Amino acid sequence: MSEGAAVVGRLRAAYESGITKPYAWRVAQLRALRRMLDEEEDAFEAALLADLGKHPVESVVTEIGLVRLEIDHVLKHLRGWLRPRRVPVPAIALPATARTMYEPLGVALVIAPWNYPVLLSLSPAIGALAAGNALVLKPSELAPATSALLAELLPARLDRRAVAVVEGGVPQTTDLLEQRFDTIFYTGNGRVGRIVAAAAAKQLTPVTLELGGKSPVYVDGTGDLRAAAERIVWGKFLNAGQTCVAPDYLLATADVAARLVPLLREAVLARYGEHPESNPDYARIPDERRFDRLLPLLADGDAAVGGTADRGRLHVAPTVLTGVARDAPIMQEEIFGPILPLIEVTGLDDAIRFVNAGDKPLALYVFSTDRAVRRAWLTRTSSGAVGFDAPNVHLSVPGLPFGGVGGSGTGAYHGERSLRVFSHEKAVFAKPLAPDTLALFRPPYTERVEAIVRRIFR
Ligand code: NAD
């Protein structure tokens, strides 16, 4: 029996025994998760530093802190969310009551990527546990220190009968995908997303796909450009550009570009200095394969900022490229690295047409004080999210759905939606045996029955 089969078999038995369903069990798991983060914060920061060169402050802001906020939000609201909800009953079915209730799906598989290996492992895990599922977590092999830490701590801190971590790469994930799960939650790239969806389809397992894509930033020059440049630089070069919702490329007219580029240069210098390769505030690329993918992209334009790279240090400088052709290789796929190409457009319509010609992005950012411009982007494009004047931060709002559309993903989570993603919303209907109103619809279909039916369903 494979490792995957053994783990899933064990967890399924635990789920079927009913231990994961009580509210108290769910809360205990979430509290244990919170305690783990509090007591092992140093270990998580060290793992993120080892895996990605992430500065501890960045690890708190973008990973550990966000998981804490999510746990606290869920703990505060879970009881209310789980309350059955009455729904109105139409006259033809009266007298009766109708309500919905969330039930767990069963055994959930969460497959996480390497770029935010704590956040993107634990944030879905919160939803799975809050919904009362057994959970198999498969962290990314490209963040090995974090993966090992999760594999050590989760079974020790949570109920190991119902929570397991399977480490490994493609063979282990492939083995897991051959097992029957009740839901699969995958975060990563679209190529593997298709593999996951195909495997899930064989078992009719529902999937949530949190993918990436090319998230554009449009700057129309109406607002404070210096402030915009600072935010774009922060959003893009955080984690060395390896953020699913990071600005992928810039869209601006030649006029605006001429004013914006010097401000981007100043902002990069102010944040990362003359030597970003040795700046501890700046993250690195996880491995040579990903470095080698990024390197040729540096040649797709003129480096107005940065443009250098060092394979030995797995370092790519924060880079802004101008003079980039619309069909350049860098514009074909999500960049997922610290290179920001600027595409010149003739104006709003040209920019919108350009975005609409590609896959639907995970996020779309607009820097503009012009309400008509904002409305045009909202109503004439489709994306997982829209951010006005601020990249990335929308994902910290638990009430907002976090997810993509089309090529950037299927399904959304965070807050109550995390509970929904890992639950089945069951319809519950109850009708007293008397009075026997259903008699109205029963054969024989006499003229009287027909007259009543025709009147009611008019
Ligand atoms: P990755 O390479 O770590 O892959 C993610 C997971 O898929 C890993 O657990 C890995 O073991 C598994 N995997 C890899 N190849 C596989 C295969 N052939 N078969 C089965 N499983 C396999 O991460 P990545 O894909 O490089 O992550 C980056 C991508 O993820 C980017 O496109 C980014 O935009 C996207 N992303 C999206 C979100 C989001 O929330 N929407 C968040 C972060 C990253």
Image (cartoon, rainbow, N blue to C red):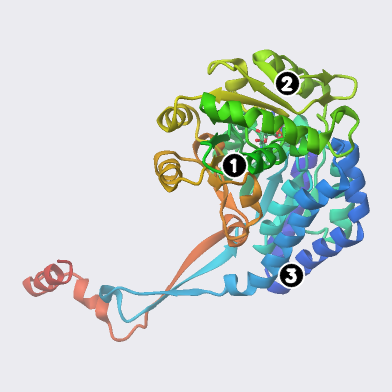
Chain-order first, disc 1 or disc 2:
1
Q: Nearer the viewer, residue 384 or 145?
A: 384
The quarter holding residue 192 reads: top right
Which label number is shown at residue 419? none
Q: Nearer the viewer, residue 319 or 138?
A: 319
Q: Is residue 131 above or below residue 112?
A: below
Name the residue beneath numbered marker 2: 294
Residue 120, position in %: x, y? 72, 47
Amino acid bearing label 1 = Leu
Q: Is residue 423 above or below residue 259?
A: below
Residue 166, position in %: x, y? 80, 43
Amino acid bearing label 2 = Leu
- The C terminus - image quarter: bottom left
Q: Residue at x 69, y 32 (%)?
A: 264
How many residues crowd around disc 1 within 10 Å: few (fewer than 14), some, or many (20 or more)? Answer: many
Q: Nearer the viewer, residue 344 or 442?
A: 344
Helix, strand or loop for disc 3: helix
Amino acid bearing label 3 = Val
Which one is closest to the eye, mark 1 or mark 2?
2
Q: Ligand 1: give its quadrant.
A: top right
Task: Report the Cα–Cα distance between label 1 and label 2.
Answer: 24 Å
Name the residue beneath numbered marker 3: 27
Helix, strand or loop for disc 1: strand
Q: Is 446 left or right of 55, judged from the image as shown?
A: left
